[in-house]
Amino acid sequence: MKYYNLLVTEWLKFRKNAVVSLLGIMFLVFMPTSIFIGKEFKNVPPPLPNNSIFFEFPSMWSYLGYVGNWLVFFFIGLMVIYMITSEVGYKTMRQNIISGYTRHDFYMSKMTSTIVLCLFVTFMYAVIGLGIGLWHTEGADLAYAFDNNWAIPRFFLMSLGYCSIGFFIAFLLRRSGIAVMFYLSYVILVEIILRWGVHGKMMGFKNSSINYYPANSFEDLMPNPLFRYAEAIPMDDLDFDFLLTYGQAAISSVIYISIFFGLSYFMFLKRDI
Amino acid sequence: MIALSINNLSKSYGRIKAVQGLNLEIEEGTIYGLLGPNGSGKTTTLGMILDIIKPDQGTYQWFEGKYGDYHRKKVGAILETPNFYPYLDATENLKIVDQIKGGKRNNFDDLLELVNLLHRKKSKFRAYSLGMKQRLAIAATLLGDPEVLIFDEPTNGLDPQGIAEVRNVMTEIASMGKTVLLASHILHEVEKICDHVAIIKNGKLLATGLVGSILSDDITIEVGSHDLDQLATVLSEFSNIENLSRKNTWLECTIPSDTNVEELNKFLFSKGIVTNHFVSRKRKLEEEFLEITKE
């Protein structure tokens, strides 16, 4: 009941917020439509057979998942950051505490709404994937669609992973602009430089350990399916897989998600608001 | 019951000691003024007892621990500025506060009526004037039937009409029998509304007690004549004259309450002083405040 009330309060806060609405609508529009860009590729290069792999079960889950990977990172990650930092900007975070929330309550209201948001986007991934798959796969049924399908839980974990980075950065930096810039630049640029430049080159650990970074772990839960083909191509200076297995990515992600949520909690409990 | 007890509360920002070993007890039902100049540590103190600022040392306890961690549900407070979601209207914002306090209200018209905002209840918060924002914040403090209300400089930045409106609402709230803690640097605001006062400066408690007891019994005398230098010399010969100072066209001093003012007038006349200005009055809180807080 308590967590339900926390969620209702979050809903009351943001249901009429233009930024949250816009980010949500963009995700809901792009999630089903982006995959259809694949229709434009009439002739796909080998080893891909044809462009139907983008839409048919079971490969569809991977391609749609990879589209979702970018969309969640961008729209949902930014939404989580905004839902925390806007409360600092409007000083409603401190007012919520003054009005009666404990710090734990406020933190839990953000954490539970982040988890629910991730469940929602995962649900949308499942529904959209099912729709596209059933429409394009001849003779497919629900049993076939969900047969040995770990893509949906992986999508949820990936979503929670990106959101946990945003969540941590938002509680750490508190200001919307700086937090958004840091989040985008960390995932797109900084981590890659850290992995390949600092860790791999400067420190000389050019091995699979460079894969165990947070954003990379989350990305490898729902990676670009074409990377699996690229991995098959031998490269002289790379004698290790540059994708984590799903199991490795899942374990690494769970650890990072716990660290990000845990650090955010202790930071929020200790600091002035 | 003790509504709030503060024990040895301290907070520093680098070298600046915002609050130093503050001790205070506020009885249930009192209208308590926290009085101090700007930067004296009033807001920091309120921030600490509302758990948005972490004290370096010291403790505080609300309602003798009766409500545990959820004591703030029984406190209505405005700290510095009114803080609401700018894209929501008055009712939607009050609904959020009510939800946080664990309430089940769906109608807030009575509260909006009390603060004279009913006609603007559908306007977005961002469209409100500062006075309206402040009044909405006061309405929010009343949600959840609070036992204590805290107002931090509630008339800051308001125009005279806004100040009058907010003071009227506060006086009305004070008459409801709630415990009120009003932090202000405006003395007559505290004098008008509060029955108890604590004076703080540089984070230290300088005086506390009933407004009447903080006020001394001394009488302030304003006296003028054509030669103020001669007047000053003669006045200093009169027994029990204190705090002699020169104002524009007269001198000001204090005498104990049991001194006969008529005797002073007679004394001056006997020394050849003919006064052209003579006023006798009780000392005001403002003078007392300046006296207490002077370096």
Image (spheres, rainbow, N blue to C red):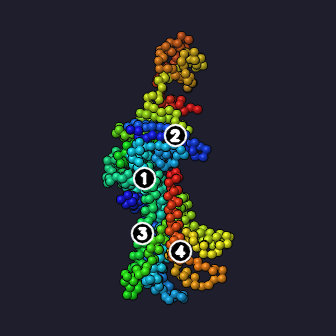
**Front of the two marks 2 and 1:** 2
Q: CA distance from mark 4 to mark 1?
A: 38 Å
Side of B227 relative to B123 (left or right):
right
Q: Earlier in the sequence, mark 3 or mark 4?
A: 3
Percent from the top left, x then y, of residue A65?
A: 47, 76
Judging by the rendered image, the residue that carries numbered circle 2 is B8
Q: CA distance from mark 3 to mark 2?
A: 47 Å
Q: Secondary structure at mark 2?
A: strand
Judging by the rendered image, the residue that carries numbered circle 1 is A101
User: Disc 3: which chain?
Assistant: A
Judging by the rendered image, the residue that carries numbered circle 4 is A248
Q: CA distance from mark 4 to mark 2?
A: 52 Å
Residue A152 in view (yes/no): yes
User: Disc 4: which chain?
Assistant: A
Q: Are marks 2 and 1 on the same chain?
A: no
**Observer-nearest of B160 and A123:** A123
Judging by the rendered image, the residue that carries numbered circle 3 is A119
Percent from the top left, x then y, of residue B169?
A: 38, 41
Name the amino acid, label 1: Tyr
User: Disc 1: which chain?
Assistant: A
Residue plotted at (46% across, 47% down): B50
**Front of the two marks 3 and 4:** 4
Name the amino acid, label 4: Gln
Image quadrant occupied by the N terminus of chain B: top left
Name the amino acid, label 3: Leu
